[in-house]
Amino acid sequence: MGSDLKESVIQAAKLMAISARTAPKARGIDDIEIMVVAEDDELERIAKTMEEIGSELGKKFFIRDADNVRRSDALLLIGVKASKPKDLDCGGCGYPTCEEFRKAVRKSGSGYSGPSCAFQLMDLGIAVGSAVKTASLLNVDNRIMFSVGVAAIRLGLLKDCEIVLGIPLSAYGKSIYFDRKPKT
């Protein structure tokens, strides 16, 4: 892809970051972290980590998604510190109060750890939705990927976040994120 087109995709990623930043947040408290990744060596490092995780966990879609990251021009990472409650005592985390949630023992799964504040997760979803809306308006191909977020956590790219989603971006004649098949 030409460097002008790649630069345009990077600019789109930056505009998407603005959309994520300005998206509404519960109680007006912004605990979202955002990073634009556009350097080829950094995209490769994330892709390699995704392949390692896919092999470790036996999840072929991580390996398939790594190929998408390699072929992308930019990547937007959006995460949240899900262990920080919004102090609403809503019970959505599984605990009756935010104070009990704070005392909970965190457990790791196959990528994320929890429990998580339900409002933090909603804030993340709204931020990601706002970002991909902007990509759509700019006609930039994208796909929201859990696998990218897990690799970003492992690499410590968004240091305070326990939940991260990645959005690879590209501009080809046909979306590289559309008819994907897991590599065997």
Image: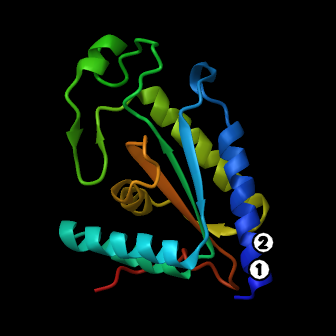
Q: Locate residue 8 relative to residue 94 in the image: left or right.
A: right
Amino acid tagged 2: Ser
Relative image position of residue 67 (x, y in whole percent): 45, 80
Does 51 appear above or below 21? below
Identify the residue shown where x is 42% and y is 56%.
149
Residue 175 is drawn in which quadrant? bottom right
Does 31 appear above or below 153? above
Circle 1 sits on which residue? 5
Identify the residue shown where x is 61% and y is 29%.
25
Q: Secondary structure at mark 1?
A: helix
Amino acid tagged 1: Leu
Q: Nearer the viewer, residue 7 or 184?
A: 7
Quadrant of the drawing holding the N terminus:
bottom right
Relative image position of residue 182 (x, y in whole percent): 35, 79
Does 148 appear above or below 92? below
Confirm or deny contact between disc 1 and disc 2 (CB under 8 A): yes
Residue 172 is drawn in which quadrant? bottom right
Relative image position of residue 155 (x, y in whole percent): 37, 60
Q: Nearer the viewer, residue 78 or 156?
A: 156
Circle 2 sits on which residue? 8
Mark 1 and mark 2: Cα distance apart in space: 5 Å
